[in-house]
Amino acid sequence: MAFTLKYVENAPKQMLVQFSNGIAKTGSKFQCELYEDKRQDDPRFCKRKLLMVHGQRLTYVGNNFEEQETYPYARKFAVAKINKSTGIAQVFDVDRFSLSPVLACNYDDISSDEEESKKQIADRTFTEKQDDLTEVFGSHKRKRAMASRLRNKVADSTNAVQTAVENLLEAGDLDVADEEESFNDMQSILPCTPNAEKVEEVYPLTKMVPAIVSQSLKADAERFIHPTREQINEMKEDSNLSSQYIIDHARTPIFAATQNEQVYEEYACCLQLLTYLIRTHKMKSADYRRKTIFEDAPEQVREWLLSQFFLGEKGQRKMPARMRDKCLAYGIVLAWNIDSFSVNVDSFKVAFMVSQQKISTIVRALGGTMKVTTSGGVKKSIACLSLPLKFPTVNNRRK
């Protein structure tokens, strides 16, 4: 059914809320408190707002300005209110808030800061006080000895960590994600169709990668279509193409690609995009803050990579751990499409320079499974995607 969009001007902004560790259950009740910056005369701060949401067990806090400051491009969020009888969809501007739970192990009681500080000073042992003096006045030798002793000391923080985890798992307001790797965040990062009838439709590349980016990849991807021995040798010498996973798939393409030119072209484009993702994932801060980042890539591909996996721009550009994990998740989905949804993890993890545990975590977050097969006495780790999807559950993660 088609609708007519009508932008509503001068209407009060609606609020769009996203919980960082899950999604709100149907029927959950929340109490909200909205605070505005008192510096209304200053255009830099007049639109800043802070939102606190109180659930039955946990309290969540977030704001509408931190994410805007990290993105170099203008971003605007809107919601549409559809009237099915008239066929008109009213579009309203919204303030987007990303909420995180407030845990006791991370936040102290502000009203009792001074008392706690005095109590901590009084409860410090003679050795701890001596370490304070060593840190300020000690020689290099004594400082190294102290640092070595502290590294070998196991702090007994088990109870605090366990309490925080139990609070998250038992919260009645949210379907809580995995506290270690943010499974729900990963599922929301990649466009997913959990009720797909075919495995190819679970993570469709047409939704993950814009058409203009796919078109821009075709020129460079030609090197992967029927490559000669000389071209393979050139790939081995090129630091951007020298991963064994890429070279093996260029030298020996899948059977379906060799039987259909269109399939072969899509296969080559996937390999080309995967080379960019491998480069992106392995970048250090000095690399992605350069002005010449991805200068050899088509402009559309360069803009897409910078907008998808980085925050800020130029010297202020950042790549948080969640963005690096997102890049790895994109790489796994591409590898599934390349290898008919059964990827040999051994060569793949070497290309991205990640551990087996990291691959396993991301694969499970995407609804896939890990298997170990034996061929010729050699064990291989295989990442598979099949229907029905097997997303981690709270009960499984507790085990």
Image (cartoon, helix red, strand yellow):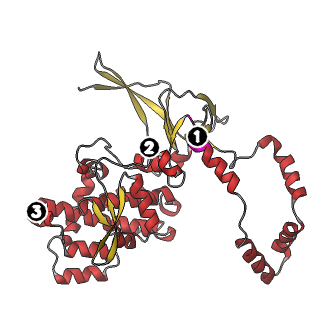
Q: Do the residues labelled 3 and 1 touch (CB within 8 Å)?
A: no
Give x and y (percent) for residue 152.
Answer: 71, 73
Q: Which mark is residue 190?
A: none
Q: Mark 2 points at which residue?
A: 75
Residue at 45% in and 46% down: 393
Which label is found at residue 170?
Answer: 1
Give the SS element for disc 2: loop
Instruction: Give the mark, 1 or 2, whose residue is nearer the N terminus.
Output: 2
Quadrant of res 150: bottom right
Residue at 34% across / 46% down in the picture?
191
- Amino acid at the residue labelled 3: Glu
Q: Nearer the viewer, residue 211 or 391?
A: 391
- Numbered label attached to residue 261: 3
Residue 110, image x, y percentages: 77, 43
Cα separation between marks 3 and 1: 53 Å
Q: Residues within 10 Å of mark 1 (few under 14, many from 20)?
A: few
Magenta span of residues: 167-172
Q: How far apart are marks 1 and 2 (CA)?
A: 35 Å
Q: Which quarter of the figure has residue 296?
A: bottom left
The span from disc 2 to disc 3 (Cα, nearest Å) is: 39 Å
Taking the spot 28% from the left edge, 49% from the top edge, the residue there is 387
Determine whether the residue tagged by mark 1 lies in a helix, strand or loop.
Answer: loop
Location of the N terminus by quadrant is top left
